[in-house]
Image (tube, helix red, strand yellow):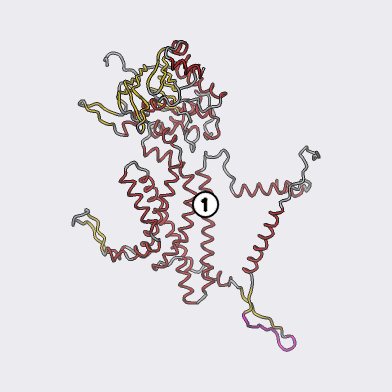
Amino acid sequence: MSVSAPPLMVEAIGVRKHFAGVEVLKGVDLKVGRGEVACLIGPSGSGKSTFLRCINHLEKHDAGELLVDGQLVGYELRNAKLYERSDRQICAERARIGMVFQRFNLFQHLTVLENITLGQEKVLKVKDDAARARARELLDRVGLAGRDGYYPAQLSGGQQQRVAIARALAMDPKLMLFDEPTSALDPELVGEVLDVMRDLARSGMTMIVVTHEMGFAREAANTVYFLDAGVIEEWGDPREVLTHPTSPRLQNFLSKVL
Amino acid sequence: MSTDGDGSIKVVPVRHVGRWVGVAAALVVVAMIVHTLLSRLPTGQRACQGTGASRVCHAVTEWRFSWDIVFRYFTTSEILHGLLVTLELTVIAMVVGIVLGMILAVMRLSPNRVLSGSAWTYTWFFRGTPVLVQLLVWFNIAILYPRISLGIPFTAVAFLTVHTNTVFTPLEAACVALGLNEAAYMSEIARAGLLSVDEGQVEAATSIGMVRRQTLRYVVMPQAMRVIIPPTGNEVISMLKTSSLASVIGVIELLGAATNIYSANYEIMPLLLTASLWYLVVTTVLSIGQFYLERHFGRGALRTPPPTPLQRMRRDLAGIVAKFPNRRGLAGAVER
């Protein structure tokens, strides 16, 4: 790693992961620079979500190197030995990596505002007033100003997902991970979530997005990775990869989704 | 199709014959119960008034259920003191049970085998032996351990030593026995509650950097409460009555007080009724409390929370009034 250039935001070298004997990731390589947007596409079961969850250590990878902001995820290299990081350290790192889930996973017992202030108050130790002010600002940014007191069950899927994005942004993340953020939404609600994500990309947020929205990948991503059966089959500029796929498997995949 | 003036359809509702038969049968049973509760029996004596030709005699009767005696004892100091002991036992045993049960449930769900195994063994033992046996064992614990010491395990070092019988009164033995037994049941209830919370909630909490303890406290526990509260209310009510077993080891709680009195005056039934009525009163109060607790912890689970009994009563009343739209006087009075 060179000293002068700032490290890549995410760098994966030969990342492997298996569940109960089934190898889900078979050596994934990926590089995402600061401010870049990477889209992961591929058929279901190809390991996209698993790889995403490895990046914030919701899953432990078994082999290979995975670095976020120049630091190994979950481990520490001292005297040529890998030491497992403590839960507290791992949690502190996770706090700076926002994650948006397919099923929103908003805290059902808390209001919209409380969903966004909880992490700020309990993890970042932000004062109550400041946390509320930040939450309102973020709600405004995702187009939900005035919905403070609603419970998640009272919102539409698209609104819930936008609250989930605001909740992740409240932690002031340096990297945002999106795990199929629009897959659980009715078609007419997909647009409002993608709009928020586009704005976020334009503002310079580093994002890794697992998605089936090829339109979004084409216009918002700097790089598209096609993951199939646990390996990156093809990657590159989205216009290139999505319009002139070289591998037969990507050609086959695109013919089904486009 | 015929319609009313305001456009709503006029229909003849379906007649539910079976339902009416059921209602009639239920009413007969209710009438029988009320009749027997309020019935009077002749004592065999006759009471007469007046003299000579104006002398009138009639048979003396008394309540079958001796209500006069029941209510005479209802507020005596012995019964009230017993009630207080019952409440004290219930509260302490439930607090011990809930706190320990929560800890056991969290232990049981720990990835560590020693922790989960210990919790399982605890539940297995305390749920597998009768609570009455446990009461008797704790009452007689001094036989096993005449002295209790606070010191370093497996050494002779002791900072504090006391005689078991001086610190362990029957009431304390009952609290410990009922509390430890309850913990076994509460741990299963708490475990079911914790498991009922969607895994996505844990992942979301983890992804914003919360440690396990914070996730449990701020995200999982509050949502688990919705599942934990109803059976816990059940346990409180059950404990209220199970605490009467403590009378066996000489704790004078509500039932103990009643038996003490009737062993002296032989008014067995009235005093059992006195105790029963008090148990019913407390259970009713607890049920009302449970309703509001459930409502509180159900926040966010339903789009519209269920109405309180008062709200429901008001709505029912409004419904009845609405059935008589022409009687302006009645409708107007209630609306106002």
Taking the magenta stretch, the answer to whether it contains residue B50 is yes
Q: Residue at horizontal 35%, vertical 21%?
A: A28
Image x and y of residue A210, in percent:
44, 23
From what the image shows, is residue A129 above or below residue B34? Answer: above
What amino acid is found at the position of numbered circle 1 in the picture? Gly
**Residue B331 in the figure: left or right of residue A182:** right
Q: Which residue is nearer to you in this view: B327 or A90? A: A90
**Residue A148 in the figure: left or right of residue B97:** right
Taking the magenta stretch, the answer to whether it contains residue B141 is no
From what the image shows, is residue A176 above or below residue B323? Answer: above
Quadrant for the N terminus of chain A, please: top left
- CA neighbours of label 1 inside 10 A, class few (<14), some (14 to 19), many (20+): few
The image quarter containing residue B213 is top left
Q: Which residue is nearer to you in this view: A127 or A65? A: A65
**Residue B323 in the figure: left or right of residue A221:** right
Image x and y of residue A19, in percent:
36, 32
Which residue ends up furthest to the bottom in the rendered image? B52
Q: How many numbered tags mark residues here? A: 1
**Residue B142 in the figure: left or right of residue B274:** left
- The residue where tag 1 is placed is B289
Q: Which residue is nearer to you in this view: B131 or A255? A: A255
The secondary structure type at the circle numbered 1 is: helix
The image quarter containing residue B204 is top left
Image x and y of residue A27, in percent:
33, 22
Tell me where the magenta segment starts and ends, as one range: B43-54
Which residue ends up furthest to the left in the rendered image? B156
Q: Which residue is nearer to you in this view: A248 or A84? A: A248
Q: Residue at horizontal 47%, vertical 55%?
A: B236
The chain holding disc 1 is B
From what the image shows, is residue B9 above or below residue B131? Answer: above
